[in-house]
C-alpha cells in the first residue's frame, strides 16, 4: 500500500463502520475503489493485511465467504434495536427540546451503518406531550449531577410565569443555596430534591424552572435518613406539603391500587368482608386528593379530620 499504511487503515476502519452491515457487506473491489477515491493505490493483498490488522486490534469484521469475499462490521457498541429504543426515548421525552432531540438522534445514527441509520428516523406519537424550548436545562442537570457526586452545594435562581406568560424571577432574583441529594423524574419533569438553606428543611425544585445554576465550594448539608424511593412514594405529584399520617377506608378490590401506590409494606388491616383500612404517610396535597377521587368512593379518608375537611372543601369547590 502506498501513501501511508496508517492513513489507509483509518480510512478502512471508517468505511467499514459507516458503510457496511450484515445486509450491506463490502467486497475487496469496493474497498480498493474507496481507497483510490482517497488517493491510495493498493492491491488485494493490502486489503487482506489491513483487515487482519483491524481484526487483531479488536474490530469485529465478519467475512462472508464466496467467489469474492465480502466484509462487514459485526458487533457494535449498540445493536440496532437498542438504538431504536434510545431514539424512541429521546423523541418521547418532554424534557428534551425538538432541536436537541434532532441533534441527539443524529449522533445516535453515527453509532451504526448509514443504511441502518435511516431506520432511526422514527415518528413517535406523543399523547399531549409538548417539547420545551429551554435548552439550559441540560447544563443545569449536568451541574446538579456533579454537585450530588461531589457532595457540594449549589446556588441558583428560580422563575415563575405571570398571567401574561412572562418569566419572572422569584423573590426579586434571590439566589437559593441548596444541597442536592437526588434528581427525580416525575410526570415528564426533573425535580432536584435536597436541603434548602432558605426553607431550613428538605425541599424540591423543578429543574426546568431553575436558572443560573452554579456549584459552590461548600460541603452539602446531608440528611442521613433520606430515602428517594420512600420520598417519591409519599409525596404525590411532587407537591412539597408536610407529611402526615392518613387513615383510609378502602374496598377490597382496591388493594392492588393501594399496593401500587404505597408498596407491599403498606400498613393494612381487615375491617369487614368488603373493606380494609390502610394507614399511610403522605403529603395531603391536591394530587393526593385527586388520586382518592379517581376511585369514586371506593377509597375514603377516615382521619385526620383536618385532611378529610380539606378534601371535602375541594369536592365542594369542584361542584
Image (spheres, grey):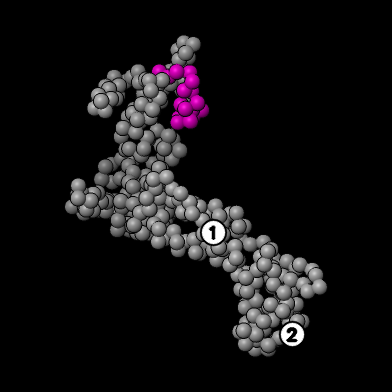
* Residue at far top of view: 272
- From the viewer's perspective, tell me whether residue 25 is left or right of residue 268: right
Q: Which residues are magenta?
A: 248-265
- From the viewer's perspective, tell me whether residue 105 is left or right of residue 241: right
Residue 42 drawn above or below residue 65: below
Name the residue tied to disc 1: 120
- From the viewer's perspective, tell me whether residue 192 is left or right of residue 314: right
Across and down, in percent, residue 208 comes to: 34, 52
Residue 154 drawn above or below residue 253: below
> Does the magenta segment cover residue 29?
no
Residue 171 drawn above or below residue 290: below
Nearer-N-terminus badge (2/1): 2
Residue at image location 75% in from the left, 77% down from the top: 48
Q: CA distance from mark 2 to mark 1?
A: 36 Å
Q: Secondary structure at mark 2?
A: loop
Name the residue tied to disc 2: 43
Amino acid at each position: 500500500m502506498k501513501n501511508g499504511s496508517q492513513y489507509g487503515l483509518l480510512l478502512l476502519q471508517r468505511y467499514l463502520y459507516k458503510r457496511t452491515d450484515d445486509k450491506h457487506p463490502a467486497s475487496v473491489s469496493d474497498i480498493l475503489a474507496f481507497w483510490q477515491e482517497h488517493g491510495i493505490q493498493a492491491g488485494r493483498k493490502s486489503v487482506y493485511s489491513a483487515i487482519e490488522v483491524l481484526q487483531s486490534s479488536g474490530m469485529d469484521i465478519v467475512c462472508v465467504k464466496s467467489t469474492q469475499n465480502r466484509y462487514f462490521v459485526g458487533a457494535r457498541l449498540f445493536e440496532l434495536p437498542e438504538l431504536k429504543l434510545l431514539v424512541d426515548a429521546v423523541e418521547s421525552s418532554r424534557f428534551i427540546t425538538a432541536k436537541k432531540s434532532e441533534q441527539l438522534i443524529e449522533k445516535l445514527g453515527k453509532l451504526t451503518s448509514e443504511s441502518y441509520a435511516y431506520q432511526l428516523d422514527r415518528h413517535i406519537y406523543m399523547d399531549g406531550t409538548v417539547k420545551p424550548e429551554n435548552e439550559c436545562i441540560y447544563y443545569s442537570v449536568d451541574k446538579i449531577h456533579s454537585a450530588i457526586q461531589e457532595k457540594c452545594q449549589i446556588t441558583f435562581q428560580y422563575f415563575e410565569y405571570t398571567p401574561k406568560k412572562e418569566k419572572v424571577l422569584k423573590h426579586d432574583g434571590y439566589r437559593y443555596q441548596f444541597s442536592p441529594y437526588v434528581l427525580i423524574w416525575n410526570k415528564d419533569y426533573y425535580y432536584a430534591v435536597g436541603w434548602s438553606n432558605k426553607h431550613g428543611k428538605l425541599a424540591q425544585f423543578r429543574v426546568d424552572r431553575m436558572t443560573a445554576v452554579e456549584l459552590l465550594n461548600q460541603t452539602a448539608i446531608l440528611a442521613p435518613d433520606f430515602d428517594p424511593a420512600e420520598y417519591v412514594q409519599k409525596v404525590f405529584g411532587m407537591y412539597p406539603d408536610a407529611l402526615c399520617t392518613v387513615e383510609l377506608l378502602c374496598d377490597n378490590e382496591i388493594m392492588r391500587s393501594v399496593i401500587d401506590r404505597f408498596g407491599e409494606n403498606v400498613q393494612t388491616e381487615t375491617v369487614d368482608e368488603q373493606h380494609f383500612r390502610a394507614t399511610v404517610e403522605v403529603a395531603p396535597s391536591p394530587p393526593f386528593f385527586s388520586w382518592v377521587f379517581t376511585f369514586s368512593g371506593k377509597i375514603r379518608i377516615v382521619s385526620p379530620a383536618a385532611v378529610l375537611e380539606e378534601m371535602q372543601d375541594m369536592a365542594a369547590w369542584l361542584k
